[in-house]
Amino acid sequence: MKQLHRKDLFGWSVFDTERNLDFHSVLWVRDGGNVLIDPLPMSAHDHSHLQRLGGASFIVITNSDHCRDAEHIASETGAMLCGPAAEEDTFPLSCNRWLYDNEEVVHGLIAYELDGSKTPGELALVLEHTTLITGDLIRCHIGGELCLLPENKLADVDKAIQSVKRLADLPGIKAVLTGDGWPLFNHGGEALHRLARSL
Amino acid sequence: MKQLHRKDLFGWSVFDTERNLDFHSVLWVRDGGNVLIDPLPMSAHDHSHLQRLGGASFIVITNSDHCRDAEHIASETGAMLCGPAAEEDTFPLSCNRWLYDNEEVVHGLIAYELDGSKTPGELALVLEHTTLITGDLIRCHIGGELCLLPENKLADVDKAIQSVKRLADLPGIKAVLTGDGWPLFNHGGEALHRLARSL
């Protein structure tokens, strides 16, 4: 796995030939159990790296299109699966826990529900007030610039815009780690504001 | 290939299991012939993407440790190979052109020779005054923060530091695309200054 902007954050990526961008997953190494977010299939090398860093106790899935390899990795690591509460009735996996808006997943990791995206209650996560981790709604197709999921995929454009503005209003966001596209490690709040103003 | 921070810049990457970071290559699409920098082996998908974007007329290799798949890609595309002049006598490939300090490779792309790195006259490139492309000396192991090649690999630490300070003094650098590690698409000059101050 690749070191991200903090010593306790790692990521791994898979290049998607359809969209010509990388999909990303995040690992937060922490006392009390490591957290994986939207885990993609891992190479043997990365899996061994994960084991050396303490395995995983929690897997957060931001939306039903980002289940990726979560079930398999949960079975290998024993991690608890956490999914978006608004998808509970139709989610393709059986989760141990359903996350609601403004819920603390583990200490220091807050889940936010987004409205209007392609799935109900898509989650975004804020780690220790400074790192925003997004699933599908907020993306980065052009290096350094955030963008929205294409309008024809949104369930409700106005609600999606309001959700982006709500995240942009969070103070102190330094990094934005997107599920799809490039990460922004610095000045993430500024990029969120640029995106919100453009909508 | 992945879109970088400009519509005319693309990149592709290979994850290095020894260092746990990505190696990167850059494609600049331009009238007068596309430029590749330190090209890694390409997947069939990326090679086809490159062909659709017009192939390659020039390949710049920043140092002899970054030859990667340049010779093979040159044979497939017909691109001219350009290498660092200070390595002319010992370079592993036969280049069509040797680049000196402050030389315009093609219009808008300036080569700078760096001193004190692990190979003589390692090249860094500045594209249209705003995008710095580095080979080995300047890297990014922690997202958002530039670093130097480890000291035990440097031929001359003081000269390497002077070379970094010279690049940091260039006005208007927005993006820093490293050969090894993460790219910085925004506030690149600020990151270069932080690096220079830390040395």
Image: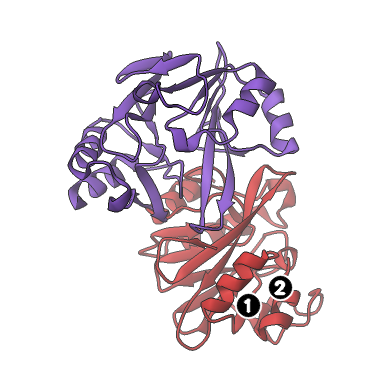
Chain colours: A purple, B red
Name the amino acid, label 1.
Ile
Q: Which residue is mark 2?
A: B70
Name the amino acid, label 2.
Ala
Residue A160: image x %, image y %?
Answer: 24, 40
Q: Give the image quarter of residue A155.
A: top left
Residue B104 visible from this viewpoint: no
Residue A93 visible from this viewpoint: yes
Q: What residue is rendered at 82% in x and 75% in y?
A: B90
Residue B59's disc number: 1
**Mark 1, secondary structure of its residue:** strand
Nearest the camera: A24 or A157? A157
**Mark 2, secondary structure of its residue:** helix
In-image side of A76 versus B126 (left or right):
right
How packed is label 2: few (under 14 Cα within 10 Å), some, or many (20 or more)? many
Q: Closer to the N terminus: mark 2 or mark 1?
A: 1
Residue A94: image x %, image y %?
Answer: 52, 20
Distance from the alpha carbon under mark 2 to that under mark 1: 7 Å
Residue B50's disc number: none
Residue B41: image x %, image y %?
Answer: 70, 65
Nearest the camera: B151 or A96? A96
State the quadrant of the N terminus of chain B. bottom right
Q: Are marks 2 and 1 in contact (CB under 8 Å)?
A: yes
In-image side of B2 versus B91 (left or right):
left
B84 over A7 or under it: above or below: below
Residue B187: image x %, image y %?
Answer: 37, 52
Q: Give the image quarter of residue B100.
A: bottom right
Direction top: furthest residue: A32
